[in-house]
Image (spheres, rainbow, N blue to C red):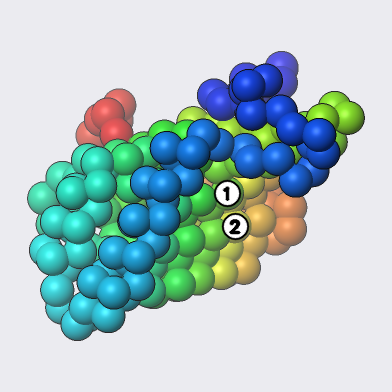
Amino acid sequence: MAKQADYKVPEALAGEDAYTRPAFSFANRARRLVWNITWLLLFRLSPRPFHAWRAMLLRLFGATLGPDCHFYPKAKVWAPWNLFCADHVAAGDGVEIYNPSPMHFASHVILSQDCYLCGATHDYNDPTFPLLAYQMSFGQYAWICARASVGPGVNVGEGAVLGLGSVATRDLAPWTVYSGNPATIIRERTRHPNATPGDPA
């Protein structure tokens, strides 16, 4: 069954050339411009230990963050207002969270250096080539390893691991280790002793 997009370019934004029209409203683009300036001047240049400072900046732009979230200076969040984190979520340098639609991270999710979470794609069968964005969720204790990528609409189960440089194109099952492109199961992971099944993001 095909995944349902959370966002599709409204007809009101249609222009003469579907490939050059904006995918988002002027208000959305203006908000992202202010955020990008803030990220460049206040987030990106902040000292590495200043996790509380960067969390504050994300919250100022609408992010929901639990206690002790560690976002490192070179981590990028496309739309903070679509970021929902429980406690102890970590995003290393070079992590890019492209979230035109909401992304939910449960407790103790780890995003290692240079991993890429892609929350949108385009309908290439539609002549207007509309952008399609999807809500995504990452279960508690999930780990996205360095330089791995998670595709649009892919949900990562509790305790799942996506290995170094791997590409997830389908949902990842709980407490399972994946590797490769496309990612396939290579082994089961021992359940974390502190994990509580079903904890919300």
Task: Specify the farthest residue to the top.
Answer: 1
- On the rendered structure, is 146 left or right of 104? right
Q: Splitting the image into 4 quarters, where does residue 139 fall?
A: top left
Crowdedness near tag 1: few (<14), some (14–19) or many (≥20) residues, C-alpha within 10 Å? many
Q: Secondary structure at mark 1?
A: strand
Viewer-proximal residue among 107 and 74: 74
Quadrant location, the C terminus? top left
Look at the picture and state if 30 lies above or below 12: below
Residue 200 point in image, percent of width and height: 27, 29
For residue 12, above or below residue 129: above
Which residue sits at x=55%, y=36%?
24
- Alpha carbon separation for disc pair 1 and 2: 7 Å
Amino acid bearing label 1 = Cys
Q: Which residue is mark 1?
A: 118
Q: Residue furthest front?
A: 16
Q: Residue at x 54, y 59 (%)?
A: 116
Q: Position of residue 166 (x, y in %)?
A: 64, 61
Residue 129 lies, in percent from the top left, at 80, 35
Q: Amino acid at mark 2?
A: Ser
In terms of secondary structure, where does tag 2 sit? strand
Please say if 189 is above or below 21.
below
Q: Residue at x 34, y 56 (%)?
A: 35
**Is residue 154 among the parts visible in the rendering?**
no
Between tags 1 and 2, which lies in front? 1
x 29%, y 64%: residue: 38
**Sequence order check, earlier mark of 1 and 2:** 1
Residue behind mark 2: 149
Question: Can residue 56 be seen at all in this image of the molecule?
Answer: yes
- Callout 1–callout 2 Cβ contact below 8 Å: yes
Dot 2 alpha-carbon crowd within 10 angstroms: few under 14, some 14 to 19, many 20 or more: many
